[in-house]
Amino acid sequence: MPVAIDLQKNRMKAARLRWLMNCWPPFLAAGIRVREIAPDFGYVRVDLVNWGLNRNYVGTHFGGSLFAMTDPFYMLMYMKRLGPEFIVWDYSASIRFMQPGRGRVTALFELTEHDLQRVRVHTQGGERFLFDHVVEVKNPNGELVAKVDRTLYFKRKADSRS
């Protein structure tokens, strides 16, 4: 039976979410490891290790694994930080490969108070708001392996508009 993750009601703690995501079969099989989620959900660090099931024909990271390692994090972080009065969705995403990924690569996700305030201001009257974030995937030398552009959709729920 699947485990229900109730982020909207702010019940899920960061450590538990990290543990669940590391047990999630798509991440587990792809070699994606959530290394850190800040207790306030303002920061996440994710690694991808290169192993047999996520290597492409030439022995580098499969592009789908690089893309997948960036997938749910900004949405989950915003859901947790903004609370249940907001609708938050991944709206679109694209990836640009800068160089082959080998070994361990890392993606960092950070939310600032300025980001949160920007969403609150732009959705105040019930309007939808699209917000772009760039996620950089880097190798241990700090070299850019891929850039992922993620656009998130925000809207206040009708009963919570101020």
Image (cartoon, rainbow, N blue to C red):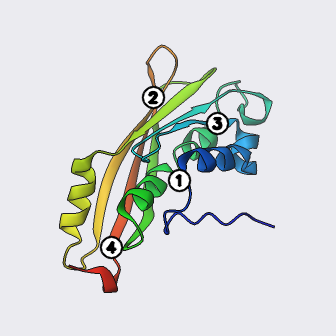
Badge 3 amino acid: Arg
Label 2: element kind: loop
- Give the Cα separation between the discs numbered 4 and 3: 30 Å
N-terminal-most mark, 4 or 3: 3
> Image check: 71 left or right of 155?
right
Above or below, 32 relative to 117: above
How far apart in space, not on screen, are marks 1 and 3 (Cα)? 13 Å
Residue that badge 2 annotates: 98
Q: Residues within 10 Å of mark 2 (few under 14, many from 20)?
A: few
Q: List x then y, in percent, for residue 126.
A: 25, 79
Sequence-wise, which precedes: disc 1 or disc 2?
1
User: Which of disc 2 and disc 3 is earlier in sequence?
Assistant: 3
Q: Which mark is residue 112?
A: none
Q: Could you give the CA–CA distance between mark 3 and mark 2, rounded to whole angstroms?
A: 22 Å
> Which percent across, then down, holds residue 152?
38, 60
Which of pointers 3 and 2 indicates the residue nearer the eye?
Answer: 3
How much space separates mark 1 and mark 4, taking CA atoms?
18 Å
Q: Is 69 drawn above or below residue 139 in the view shown? A: below
Q: Disc 1 residue type?
A: Pro
The reply to whether the C-beta atoms of the residues labelled 4 and 2 are less than 8 Å apart is no
Q: Secondary structure at mark 1?
A: loop
Give the mark nearer the N terminus: 4 vs 2.
Answer: 2
SS under mark 3: strand
Helix, strand or loop at disc 4? strand
Q: Is residue 29 left or right of residue 159?
A: right
- Residue at left 56%, top 26%? 105
* Residue 33 badge: 3
